[in-house]
Amino acid sequence: MNKKRKPASGAEETKFSREVKSQATLKRKAQRDGKRSIWFGLGMSGLVGWSVIVPTVIGAAAGVWIDNNYPSRFSWTLMLLLLGLVVGCLSAWRWVASEFQGIQEDSDE
């Protein structure tokens, strides 16, 4: 009944230690990610929204000022609004891409 275990070979110990290390890494990552609440997600979406809205509003305001002070055939308001929207979307896309790359690097570890 009282059987003694044989010592494991070097290859099995290495495989076991790799498995323990991988599970520990996954647990640390889950704990780190588990601390993020719904408010964290809402805050991040708010940051992305603000990074689009601010250049759009600035473009529209500059366009309105130009249209009021220097009348022309075409609408500066519309052109600068669209320019602000494009700049804001590119900015948000760049930021989200860098965050995604950071997440990918963390998952590779």
Image (cartoon, rainbow, N blue to C red):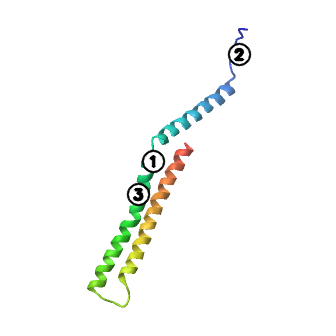
Q: Residue 29: percent from the left, percent from the top? A: 51, 39
3 vs 1, front mark:
1
x and y percentages locating residue 41 in the rendered image: 45, 51
Residue type, label 2: Lys
Which residue is identified by label 1? 38
Q: Gap between marks 3 and 1, in whole Å?
A: 12 Å
Packing grade of label 1 (10 A; few <14, some 14-19, many >=20) is few
Q: Name the residue under label 2.
A: 6
Secondary structure of the residue carrying numbered label 2 = loop
Residue 86 sits in quarter? bottom left
Report the disc number at residue 46: 3
| Spot occupied by residue 53 in the image (x, y as percentages of width and height) | 38, 66
What amino acid type should be assigned to the residue bearing mark 1?
A: Ile
Who is closer to the viewer here, 20 or 48? Answer: 48
Image point (31%, 75%), residue name? 61
Considering the numbered disc 3 on the image, is that residue within a helix, a strand or a loop?
helix
